[in-house]
């Protein structure tokens, strides 16, 4: 595509913050960074020399002490890796930053290879030999971490194969993921005489002007289509790589490894997927027929999916207003959560502006407990951007609270991590809805929330079904980009219903979704979190006394407890067959209210 100037940030947004990565390191050439690399190398070499082949011989107290040493090394590497990853996310087009990022990954990989033996040897200890070691009180703290390490025992390979896979990661999956990121970040979309980034182009799909939405959609189709062979190669290669490793590790299905890492049973995930698919007609199909009626169209074009409703000016919300909206919503629920959230704004932990080369979308990165999380958003002043900010702040607050568990025990499975973020969105939405008494504005707020929930639940389960279909077909041979597009269209029609026209122009849209590349089958975690939050919020409304305290305790548990234990204080059980339908019932209730307002 021809080079054109990027659009300038809107002055209506006010001053947007850039994060300050100096809390990690002053720069890629900082002496402290090189010193930490050297320290990590020395710690890894000493650790290997002292403990390799001897782990099974350690007493309970000694094993606890060694795990503590291992945690310190992993946290040091985590700090380095977080800095490199965040710097790269800020500008993927800068070749010097890309070089630094790759070199840092390779150096960390070489250091990590030296201590890979530790978890492998832990998993070779028989249950009968490990259990007596827990008589040592020092080891009891590490039981949850050991539990999560040992769930991989049936899928562990020989030490030589494990080392080979670990070392080759930087030239395998990681390299292909980087190719995807840099290809997507480098695309420019010619719209209205300007070359727009990914984030800017997709933002125009929410423009009130249907002609502008169509122009943006056409440009997106053209831009993605121009790189479709590269995207197809990336997806095919990574799917094949996963299939080979899954086969060697004896995973039953492509999704099984993700379920194991999420600490959730295959049957529970199957029940979630089945419940959402069964609800497609009563949720997405029903809602989008309403939306087509409101927009005065017999059928919606694919670029109308996020169109604002008639009368919805979707005014630009300046950054400071967004900050106040989100923090006030958190504060009404829990002043403690709001106080933690305020630190992200006041201490330079958020990167908000749209920039060329910046990672699209949004994320909250936990870094390490000795530092603090960082949030990346591409803020453009729309209501959805405010909800995204509330979502990512939920992650960030969760990560701060869980950090008290220490580096190894702070990490939360994706399914529960998405609970905190979606709960933050729900708090913000409920605050806005409670303050709105004008029926027309209330309908618009409800419709926006329903669309967000459909995107979080129906669309993400549809993404998961797309991944399943693609990975299953890939096992029979390479899948052409055209065939991938056909699968995509079939899944979208099934999920969103006959209110839409999904033609060939929409076929390349599978190619820009990073989760398919970075974390296969991640996406169902959003639906898990949304349905769980719907049930949690229902409990909160019925029994508010003490709820916030129990909720903070759930977040502070980090990875020490599984979903059954975490939800028990709220009287919830995700393995209950009716659990998911209760969560989906909240969305149905909102659509019922919209239909009543429309009557």
Image (cartoon, rainbow, N blue to C red):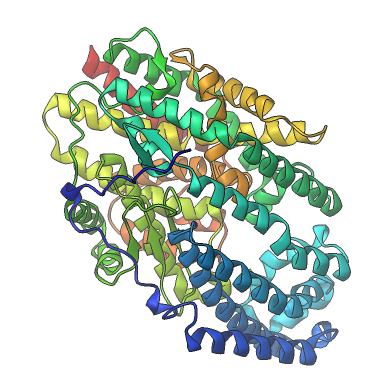
Q: Is residue 534 left or right of residue 137?
A: left
Which residue is most to the top? 298
Image coordinates of residue 406 in percent, x first then y, are 52, 77
Q: In this view, does 305 lie to the left or right of 139?
A: left
Q: Which residue is drawn at 26% across and 41% down?
A: 382
Image coordinates of residue 34 in percent, x first then y, are 55, 86
Image coordinates of residue 288 in percent, x first then y, are 39, 19
Q: In this view, does 228 lie above or below 319?
A: above
Q: Residue at x 26, y 63 (%)?
A: 338
Q: In this view, does 503 lie above or below 7?
A: above
Q: In this view, does 517 lie above or below 313?
A: below
Quadrant of residue 357 within the rendered picture: bottom left
Q: Residue at x 55, y 43 (%)?
A: 523
Q: Who is closer to the viewer here, 163 or 291?
A: 163
Quadrant of residue 271 within the rendered picture: top right
Can see residue 530?
A: yes
Which residue is most to the left? 438
Q: In this view, does 294 lie to the left or right of 74?
A: left
Q: Who is closer to the viewer here, 84 or 43?
A: 84
Total number of numbered discs in the rendering: 0
Can see residue 577?
A: no
Q: Who is closer to the viewer here, 571 or 552?
A: 552
Q: Who is closer to the viewer here, 6 or 581?
A: 6
Image coordinates of residue 247 in percent, x first then y, are 84, 48
Q: Quadrant of the C terminus?
A: top left
């Amino acid at each position: 595509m021809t080079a054109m100037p990027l659009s300038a940030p809107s002055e209506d947004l006010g001053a947007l913050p850039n994060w300050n990565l100096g809390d990690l390191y002053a720069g890629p050439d900082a002496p402290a960074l090189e010193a930490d690399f050297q320290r990590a190398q020395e710690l890894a070499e000493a650790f290997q020399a002292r403990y390799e082949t001897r782990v099974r011989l350690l007493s309970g107290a000694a094993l606890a002490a060694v795990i503590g040493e291992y945690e310190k090394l992993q946290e040091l590497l985590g700090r380095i890796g977080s800095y490199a990853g965040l710097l790269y996310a800020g500008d993927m087009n800068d070749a010097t930053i890309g070089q630094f990022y790759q070199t840092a990954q390779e150096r960390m990989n070489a250091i990590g290879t030296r201590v890979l033996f530790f978890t492998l040897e832990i998993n070779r200890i028989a249950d009968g030999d490990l259990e007596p070691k827990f008589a040592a009180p020092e080891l009891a703290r590490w039981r949850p971490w050991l539990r999560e390490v040992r769930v991989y025992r049936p899928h562990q390979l020989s030490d030589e194969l494990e080392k080979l896979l670990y070392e080759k990661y930087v030239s395998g999956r990681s390299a292909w993921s980087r190719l995807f990121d840099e290809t997507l970040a480098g695309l420019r979309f010619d719209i209205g005489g300007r070359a727009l980034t990914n984030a800017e182009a997709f933002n125009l799909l929410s423009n009130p002007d249907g002609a502008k939405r169509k122009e943006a959609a056409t440009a997106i189709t053209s831009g993605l289509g121009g790189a479709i062979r590269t995207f197809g190669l990336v997806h095919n290669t990574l799917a094949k790589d996963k299939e080979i490793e899954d086969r060697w590790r004896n995973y039953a299905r492509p999704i099984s490894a993700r379920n194991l890492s999420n600490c959730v049973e295959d049957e529970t995930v199957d029940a979630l997927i089945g419940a959402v698919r069964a609800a497609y007609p009563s949720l997405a199909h029903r809602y989008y027929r309403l939306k087509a009626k409101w927009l005065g169209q017999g059928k919606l074009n694919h670029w109308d999916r996020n169109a604002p409703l008639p009368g919805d000016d979707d005014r630009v919300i300046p950054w400071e207003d967004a900050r106040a909206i989100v923090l006030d919503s958190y504060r009404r629920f829990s002043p403690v959560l709001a106080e933690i959230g305020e630190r992200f704004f006041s201490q330079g932990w958020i990167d908000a502006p749209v920039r060329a080369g910046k990672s699209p979308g949004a994320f909250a990165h936990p870094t390490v407990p000795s530092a603090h999380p960082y949030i990346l958003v591409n803020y453009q002043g729309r209501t959805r951007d405010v909800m995204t900010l509330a979502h990512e702040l939920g992650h960030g607050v969760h990560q701060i609270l869980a950090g008290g568990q220490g580096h190894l025990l702070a990490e939360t499975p994706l399914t529960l991590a998405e609970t905190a973020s979606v709960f933050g969105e729900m708090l913000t939405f409920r605050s806005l809805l409670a303050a709105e008494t004008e029926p027309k504005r209330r309908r618009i707020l409800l419709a926006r929330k329903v669309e967000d929930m459909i995107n979080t639940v129906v669309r993400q389960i549809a993404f998961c079904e797309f991944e399943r279909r693609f990975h299953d077909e890939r096992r029979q041979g390479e899948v052409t980009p055209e065939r991938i597009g056909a699968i995509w269209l079939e899944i979208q029609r099934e999920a969103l219903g006959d209110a839409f026209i999904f033609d060939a122009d929409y076929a390349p849209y599978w190619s820009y979704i990073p989760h398919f590349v970075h974390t296969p089958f991640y996406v169902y975690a959003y639906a898990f979190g949304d349905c769980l939050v719907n049930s949690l919020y229902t409990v909160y409304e019925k029994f508010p006394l003490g709820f916030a305290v129990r909720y903070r305790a759930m977040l502070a548990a980090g990875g020490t407890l599984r979903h059954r234990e975490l939800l028990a204080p709220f009287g919830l059980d995700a393995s209950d067959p009716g659990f998911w339908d209760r969560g989906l019932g909240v969305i149905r209730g909102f659509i019922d209210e919209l239909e009543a307002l429309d009557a």
